[in-house]
Image (cartoon, rainbow, N blue to C red):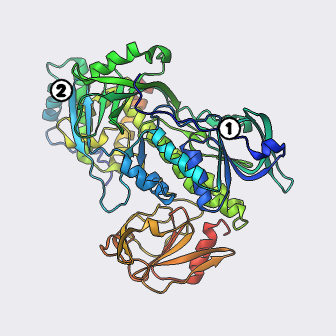
Amino acid sequence: MLQTYTYPEFAYVQSPEQAAGEVKRHPVIIIGAGPIGMTQALDLAARGVASVILDDNNTVSIGSRAVCYAKRPLEIWDRLGLGEGYAARGIQWKVGKVFFRNDLAYQFDLLPEEHHKMPAMINLQQYYLEEELVKACDANPLVDLRWKHKLLSLEQTSGTGDDVATLTVETPDGVFRLQADWVIAADGANSDTRRMVGADFTGHFFQDRFLIADVVMKNDFLKVPERWFWFDPPFHRNQSVLLHKQCDSVWRIDFQLGWDADPNEEKKPENVIPRIQAMLGPDAEFELEWVSVYQFACRRADNFRHGRVLFTGDAAHQVSPFGARGANTGVQDCDNLSWKLALVLKGDAPLALLDTYHEERAFAADDNLLNSTRSTDFITPKSRASLRLRNAVLELARTEPFARPLVNSGRLSTPTLYAHSSLNTADTSAFDGKMSPGTNCADAPVTVNGQAAWLLNQLGDGFVLLCFGPGARPVSVGNVTARVLEVGKDLQDAQGVLAQRYDAQPGTVYLIRPDQHVAGRWRAFDAEQTTAALSRALALA
Amino acid sequence: MALNRQPNICNPDSFYDELIHAQRDLTDDQADTLLAKLALILANHVGDRAVLTEAIALARHNTLASVSQA
């Protein structure tokens, strides 16, 4: 097979603690150096928390795997200094085509909303994503990334007033033990950590297998990147196929196989190549770069916190690949967990704040599972009647615009609003627009010192009072302060987009969490109300 | 607006005649597809989510009740 990418091999280094034979206690140990584990470590570091990442391997993701990253994760990576690089490198497709059987059913143009720093989504091979994360981790003095460290067992002591997790880890130098105040399991859908703590992982709403292939196109296959989705194509009857472009002339093809398929038979090149040739036409010249069979179920852990162990990403929840909800939702787990864990470790917030990690992210996981299940129900109808309705929608879609919104080939992952979160303070005045408490802040173009800038880049790492005009003062609860960011002074809303998105009037104030979510908002600053909202957002109220 | 469960089609005989004759020359499979499309077209025309929920529930309950009586 062709190789457009050379997999790096990261050096194993024996840790000083293993060499010295001491059992060292760390504030946070993260299991798994995938996109989620590394993002978690970088986000904790941004909040002043040191962590150790243990990974049993020593390279990046083999194959492209997660390919599509949506706006919100890109905004989170932008907060960590990686967003601009990803946005520049990633592929953005504009035209989507839906095929049914032999024909094009319809095509559509993606019309992303204007005035956001980050694009609606990009396609980028997971290995490129991870490469940048590894570099950022290595450059960060608060991140200790250790390759070839395999977790063998994990024990927790609790109720002693000094809860701790003890990890037994194997390296090329043998077995040693280390301790952590908190363990974050980011070790994927087949999480060993989850098994070790005995967390339930339930809810087989749907299960299926996919053959995923990275293909290098040799001739000018398509001038502009497009996304093609086939329902019941002649070259793969009764199944679905997805084609989309990544970097370096690499195209990703996902063949749905069904649960009964034999994965080993299906991924043999002599079976894969004719299928791709039939799909792309006799003139297409291509080479296979990577083929894998991926199987999944829709399910989630019963609780994202088990004592001192916190679950993130696929270790906490697994969804179908439609809509790119795996990595995207995992990065939002990190965003939610980091500031809470940092405040709890510093003693600035109670343990109850960490329980809101489960509250908010399990709610998001359930929302993702619902969306993912709806997509799979459309793509793989479960009964004769639902197959008939699905095909009726696709046939109508050829000529009838009304049918097109019913076609569900995976909805692009968008953030789940924490609409019912216990950290929210409910509105007491009327507001229009989308920025209700629990919503992630929409970006907007602003001007800072006469220079074009973006709102999200001004929010920093702590709590912020975004006030439209003068009148607000910083408020504090214990050691936690919400600083003031004043529109008209610290930044200018030159184009009026900011005021429009936040339905702002002179005097309007938003309390924004460290993860850029709205905690509360008022038509005028009131120190008492704002302080109470900050207290509530820290799980103190 | 609630689902209208009272007669609302003027000249019901001609409507019913048109509905069944729309299936002439079709295979059973095509006829079933026609009915599925008709449901989708009319649902879109109605648009009101609450009314659609009521209509779906009525069709389901009526079907289940009819089976238990058969």
Front residue of A285/B17: it is A285
Front residue of A237/A343: it is A343
Give residue A194's mark: 1
**Is residue A262 positioned above or below B66 on the image?**
above
| Image quadrant assignment for residue B10 | top left
Q: Secondary structure at mark 2?
A: helix
Horizontal and vertical percent for residue A375?
40, 37
Which circle, 2 or 1, is nearer the viewer? 1
**Which chain does tag 2 point to?**
B
Task: Please identify the quadrant where the N terminus of chain A is shown.
Answer: top left
**Is residue A6 positioned above or below A281 on the image?**
below
Q: Are marks 2 and 1 in contact (CB under 8 Å)?
A: no
| Image quadrant assignment for residue A72 | bottom left
Name the residue that disc number 2 marks: B20
Q: Amino acid at mark 1?
A: Arg
Q: Secondary structure at mark 1?
A: helix
Left or right side of A519 for A445: left
**Is residue A500 positioned above or below A172 on the image?**
below
Identify the residue at horizontal 16%, vertical 37% (top origin).
A399
Can the viewer see residue B7? no
Horizontal and vertical percent for residue A140?
60, 55
**Which chain does tag 1 point to?**
A
Left or right side of A307 for A125: left
